[in-house]
């Protein structure tokens, strides 16, 4: 019974972490490293560190979600203002 509760807890943590990652990815400025303004660059860098930490926690699922968002950015469906069409 303890293993079942532990597995459920891990699944819940993964779900919560993926949801948090999705939120951060949907509003992240993917072009922060091109910013002329140091504050914008610093903010983007800090956000990316948080995103990387969540990706690490989520493992393969986090990697897959990140790749989905990068694909959207590259396709022009995600801007610095967040999602345009997808979510």
Image (tube, rainbow, N blue to C red):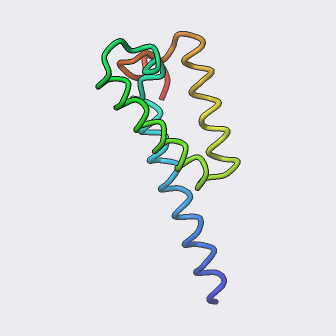
Instruction: Name, please, the residue furthest toward the right.
Output: 60
**Total label count?**
0
Residue 71: horizontal and vertical position, in percent? 63, 21
Q: Which residue is drawn at 43% across and 21% down?
A: 32
Q: Which of 24 and 31 is in front in this view?
A: 31
Q: In this view, does 38 lie above or below 47?
A: above
Residue 20: horizontal and vertical position, in percent? 44, 47
Q: In which quarter of the image is residue 14?
A: bottom right
Quadrant into which the N terminus falls: bottom right
Side of 7 relative to 51 (left or right): right
Q: In this view, does 2 lie above or below 65?
A: below
Q: Residue at x 55, y 43 (%)?
A: 52
Residue 59: horizontal and vertical position, in percent? 67, 52
Side of 85 relative to 4 (left or right): left
Instruction: Name, please, the residue furthest toward the bottom.
Output: 1
Q: Is residue 20 above or below residue 76?
A: below
Q: Which residue is drawn at 47% across and 56% down?
A: 16
Q: Residue at x 42, y 39 (%)?
A: 23
Q: Nearer the viewer, residue 24 or 46?
A: 46
Residue 84: horizontal and vertical position, in percent? 43, 16
């Amino acid at each position: 019974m303890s293993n079942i509760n532990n597995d459920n807890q891990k699944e819940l943590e993964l779900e919560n972490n993926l949801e948090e990652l999705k939120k951060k990815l949907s509003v992240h400025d993917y072009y922060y490293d091109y910013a002329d303004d140091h504050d914008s660059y610093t903010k983007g860098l800090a956000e990316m560190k948080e995103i990387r930490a969540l990706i690490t926690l989520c493992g393969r699922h986090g990697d897959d979600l990140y790749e989905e968002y990068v694909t959207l950015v590259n396709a022009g469906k995600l801007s610095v203002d967040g999602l345009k069409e997808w979510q």
